[in-house]
Image (cartoon, rainbow, N blue to C red):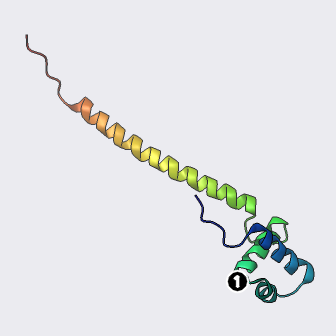
Amino acid sequence: MPAPRKYPDELRERAVREVRTTGRPIAHVAKDLGIHKEALRGWVRRAEADTGERDDRLTTAEWEELRQLRREIAELRRAKEILKAASAFFAAELDRPRTRPTR
């Protein structure tokens, strides 16, 4: 479960909208709203990537896809390790000599 967000979504949207519509410096808007300026800078960059204004950053959709793929990879690696251990166990069972029951 992800950590709770420090700033509500409404505040994020309002801050980004204010920076983009007024043209005021990020540091000034951040100070007025009580937000850390680097947090606001990241939000503005993400919004610019989402609207296609920046091509040097991933969009929100791309970030979500990347997170999902990384989770899938981790799960597949865990499954691979389990299957590897199981196959080694069963291979050892097959290699053991079998004894015949005595009559």
The structure residue drawn at horizontal position 91% and vertical position 82%, both measured from the top left corner, is: 22
Residue drawn at 47 percent across, 50 percent down: 77
Horizontal side, residue 98 vs residue 47: left or right: left
Q: Is residue 81 left or right of residue 19?
A: left
Q: Name the residue: 20% across, 31% down.
A: 96
How would you rate the neighbour count of disc 1 (Cα within 10 Å): few for under 14, some for 14-19, many for 20 or more? few
Image height of 56 relative to 79, above or below: below
Is 28 positioned to the left or the right of 38 in the image? right
Q: Position of residue 27 (x, y in %)?
A: 77, 88
Give the structural element (helix, strand or loop) at label 1.
Answer: loop
The quadrant in which residue 29 appears is bottom right
Quadrant housing the N terminus: bottom right
Relative height, residue 77 to residue 55 (above, below):
above
Residue 90 in view here: yes
Which residue is painted at 76% across and 67% down in the image? 9
Observer-nearest of 73 and 32: 32
Q: Percent from the top left, x then y, of residue 56? A: 75, 72
Expressed as whole percent of the image width and height from the top left, the position of residue 74 reads: 51, 53
Q: Residue furthest top?
A: 103
Q: Quadrant of the C terminus?
A: top left
Q: Position of residue 50 (x, y in %)?
A: 81, 65
Q: Which amino acid type is marked by label 1? A: His
Q: How many marks?
A: 1
Determine the image quadrant of residue 49.
bottom right
The vertical placement of 61 against 21, above or below, is above
Is residue 55 among the parts visible in the rendering? no
Q: Which residue is mark 1?
A: 36
Residue that extends furthest to the right in the rendered view of this protein: 21
Viewer-proximal residue among 39 and 97:
39
